[in-house]
Amino acid sequence: MSVELPFAPVDAIIRQNAGDLRVSAGAAEELARRIQDHGAELAIDAAERATADGRKTLMAEDFGVQQVVDRDDLYLPVAPIDRIARLQIDDRYRVAMDARIALADILEDYANNVASAAVKLAHHADRRTVQAEDIETYFSLFE
C-alpha cells in the first residue's frame, strides 16, 4: 500500500518534539505509514456510525469530535487525510470537510504522542537522530 500522506508535515511534527535531535527520513516515513493505518481504521468506525444514523456522509461527530479546530492550525494537509479516510471504506461514502479536519486533528495528536515517545527512545539509546526503529519500538511496546 502506498502512503498517501506527504512526509514533510510528518517530519515537522517529529521535529517539533525532537528538540536538538535530528530526524531520519525513515522515521518520518514510518510514522506517516502508521498515521495512515490508524486514520483508515478510524474512518471504518466512523462509516459504521454514519450508517447507523442512516447517512452516507461522514461528519466530525462520527469521529467523536464535538468542536472542530481551525484548518490553518494543523500541520497535516486535509487532502491526503481525505484520501486516507476513503482507503478502506465503501465508495458510496462521502467525507464532509469538518470530518476531514477533525480526522486530521485526531491524527496529528496521535502523531505527536508517538513522536514524543520516539524522541525519548532515541535519547535512551543515546542517539542524536530519531530513527524508524524508534517509531517501531514504540508500537511494539505500547500497542
Image: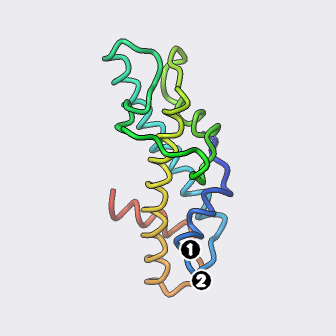
The secondary element bearing badge 1 is classed as: strand
93 left or right of 11? left
User: How would you rate the neighbour count of disc 2 (Cα within 10 Å): few for under 14, some for 14-19, many for 20 or more?
Assistant: few
Is 128 in front, or is 19?
A: 19
Q: Name the residue at 66% across, 55% down.
A: 7
Q: Name the residue at 54% across, 45% down.
A: 70
47 left or right of 13? left
Q: Position of residue 43 (x, y in %)?
A: 44, 32
Q: Position of residue 46 (x, y in %)?
A: 39, 29
Indicate which disc, 2 or 1, sits on the residue closer to the N terminus.
Answer: 2
Tell me the number on the disc at residue 130: 1
Name the amino acid, label 1: Val
Determine the CA span between mark 2 and mark 1: 10 Å
The image quarter containing residue 66 is: top left
Q: How is the image coloured?
A: rainbow
From what the image shows, is residue 119 above or below residue 79? below
Q: Name the residue at 42% across, 70% down.
A: 117
From what the image shows, is residue 30 above or below residue 14? above
Q: Position of residue 74 (x, y in %)?
A: 57, 51
Name the amino acid, label 2: Asp
Tell me the number on the disc at residue 20: 2
Q: Position of residue 120 (x, y in %)?
A: 44, 77
Quarter in which the N terminus is drawn: top right
Tell me the number on the disc at residue 121: none
